[in-house]
Image: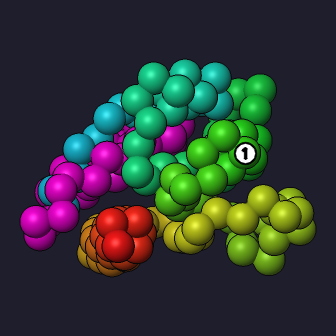
């Protein structure tokens, strides 16, 4: 990662193998993985205790609540957090379920490491540029 700092990422995925792969991909891209969760309850606790810059979130979490419920809570509490929804479902099938809850990006499983890395790098650079621009406007 360039001199932008180290993006903080949280991973919410109930498939341990995929969670591990996402974790390793993020670390190899220069990110700090602040934690992983396998269900909605643990995800909300993680996000409260260690707010990340990026959230990688499984659409179909096992348990009482799904990824869309986590996404909705995140968008209300932290609208600036960049959210990446990952799914193996057909995008047309989940489009109606989104119902106004908009992740920043949706990636289809299997998530290709180079696609995730590129998305994080470009999104983090854009976020830093917006911060720098806001800082220039407040100092003049």
Residue at left offset 40%, top offset 29%: 50
Asked if residue 18 is among those painted magenta in the image, a careful observer would answer yes
Q: What stretch is highlighted in magenta?
A: 1-28
Quarter holding the C terminus?
Answer: bottom left
Residue at left offset 52%, top offset 53%: 81
Above or below: residue 15 compared with residue 115: above
22 relative to 92 in the view: left or right: left
Residue at left offset 23%, top offset 44%: 32
Check disc 1: other Cα within 10 Å, few if <14, some if 14-19, many if 20+.
few
Please name whichever residue, 63 or 98, is drawn nearer the observer in this view of the structure.
98
Instruction: Please count the marks in the image.
Output: 1
Local secondary structure at mark 1: helix
**Residue 4 position in % (x across, y down):** 18, 64
Residue at left offset 36%, top offset 47%: 9
- Label 1: which residue? 76
**Residue 2 position in % (x across, y down):** 11, 69
70 relative to 82 in the view: left or right: right
As drawn, the residue found furthest toward the left would be 3
Above or below: residue 80 compared with residue 49: below
């Amino acid at each position: 990662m360039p001199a932008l700092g180290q993006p903080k990422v949280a991973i919410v995925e109930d498939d341990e193998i995929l969670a591990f792969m996402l974790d390793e991909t993020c670390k190899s891209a220069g990110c700090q993985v602040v934690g992983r969760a396998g269900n909605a309850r643990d995800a909300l606790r993680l996000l409260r205790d260690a707010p990340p810059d990026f959230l990688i979130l499984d659409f179909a979490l096992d348990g009482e609540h799904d990824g869309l419920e986590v996404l909705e809570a995140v968008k209300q509490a932290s609208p600036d957090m960049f959210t990446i929804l990952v799914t193996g479902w057909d995008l047309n099938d989940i489009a109606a379920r989104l119902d106004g809850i908009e992740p920043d990006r949706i990636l289809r499983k299997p998530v290709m490491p180079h696609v995730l890395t590129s998305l994080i790098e470009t999104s983090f650079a854009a976020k830093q540029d917006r911060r720098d621009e806001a800082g220039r406007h407040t100092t003049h």
